[in-house]
Amino acid sequence: ADITSNQWLPECTATVDAVVMSFCHLLPADKPTVLENVAGTLKPGGLLILECFHPDQIAKGYKAKSGGPADPSMMYTLQELRSLLPAGGTELEAAEIEYELSEGAFHAGTGAVTRMVWRKASA
């Protein structure tokens, strides 16, 4: 399925307990639709667990060792995530941090990441 379309949504609406988005970097134009669709798949009280590169990944020169997209607009800040997720949800945990990645030759070294655990509003 194409994550940027909503053709798969009717059969998935409010059916999922949790969605994990791990380094799912998208074009800026696709971010609102994808996050809206992901939130739509969650049952009331469902969780979105997200970790992705922060724009500091490029600004601080970490990309060469620990990877990530070349375009910082494909990365996320907490401010952006907060503006894109539906109102009424609860941010359970959130951080913009740097830590040492050790995930193979192309993802080793300091990385700047954004993390969030968000709960969809209960019905």
Image (cartoon, rainbow, N blue to C red):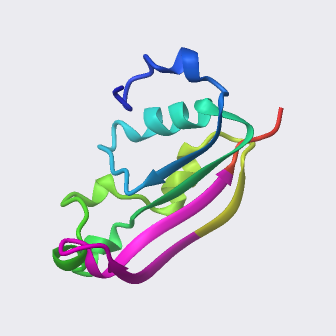
Looking at the figure, which quarter contains the N terminus? top left
Q: Is residue 59 left or right of residue 53?
A: left
- Which one is in front, 52 or 101? 101
Residue drawn at (47%, 51%) of the image: 21
- Bounds of the magenta segment: 95-118
Q: Is residue 87 above or below residue 52?
A: above
Report the predominant secondary structure element of the magenta stretch: strand
Farthest residue to the front: give it: 104
Looking at the figure, which quarter contains the C terminus? top right
Q: Is residue 1 above or below residue 65?
A: above
Q: Position of residue 122 (x, y in %)?
A: 82, 38
- Residue 109 drawn in magenta: yes
Q: Is residue 118 above or below residue 62?
A: above
Residue drawn at (75%, 42%) of the image: 88
Q: How many marks?
A: 0
Residue drawn at (52%, 50%) of the image: 20
Quadrant of the image occupied by residue 116: bottom right
Quadrant of the image occupied by residue 105: bottom left
Farthest residue to the right: give it: 123
Q: Is residue 90 left or right of residue 41?
A: right
Residue drawn at (30%, 73%) of the image: 103
Quadrant of the image occupied by residue 60: bottom left
Q: Position of residue 74 (x, y in %)?
A: 31, 53
Q: Is residue 30 above or below residue 24?
A: above
Q: Position of residue 14 (x, y in %)?
A: 67, 27
- Residue 113 drawn in magenta: yes
